[in-house]
Amino acid sequence: MAVKKVVTHPAEVLETPAETVTVFDKKLKKLLDDMYDTMLEMDGVGLAAPQIGILKRAAVVEIGDDRGRIDLVNPEILEKSGEQTGIEGCLSFPNVYGDVTRADYVKVRAFNRQGKPFILEARGFLARAVQHEMDHLDGVLFTSKISKYYTEDELADMEG
């Protein structure tokens, strides 16, 4: 697998809706593996294909819980409820952090790397990460949802 260069803002690819994946082949599996390797290398918890310059509806998420790596191909939100506000960052926006309000619960239908559909129910931080990556697939930037920005010093003070 390979670590890819993460596209940083400003870049048109980050604001362009991605195309539906129609072929589930070795090329898709390599894309997902490269995205995962890139996400880990950059200390992220999620990465969407547009962030490495590929306009395909594919994302990977891993928040460090017992679910492990989750590949999301052509994901769509079926249900969402509740509300949470928390600090987000983005690999495509180095050193930009801010409060973003999102649903606390999401039920998502997606396909795995083999093209098999599955349902993911997520709450809390996982729900936040999934929604953030799905926004990338729609060309929506997290900065459009930030209600308050934080500097790195402010974040360090919060972490104590």
Image: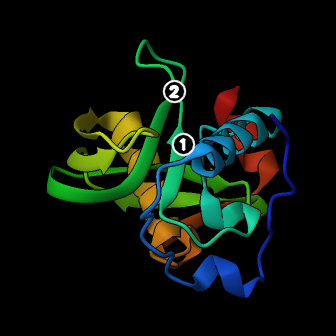
Q: Residue 117: horizontal and vertical position, in percent?
A: 25, 43
What amino acid is at disc 1?
Val
Numbered disc 1: secondary structure: strand
- Give the numbered dot on residue 15: none
Q: Which residue is drawn at the image coordinates 54% and 20% (left, top)? A: 64
Position of 107 compared to 85: left or right?
A: left
The residue sitting at 25% across, 37% down in the picture is: 120
**Which disc is residue 69 wearing?**
2
Q: Nearer the viewer, residue 7 or 127?
A: 7
Q: Amino acid at mark 2?
A: Arg
Q: Nearer the viewer, residue 107 or 37?
A: 37
Q: Which mark is residue 60?
A: 1
Residue occupying the far top of the picture: 66
Residue 129, given in percent of the width and then of the height, sits at 46, 45
Specify the quadrant of the image occupied by residue 7.
Answer: bottom right
* Mark 1 vs 2: CB contact within 8 A: yes
Q: Position of residue 20 (x, y in %)?
A: 42, 70
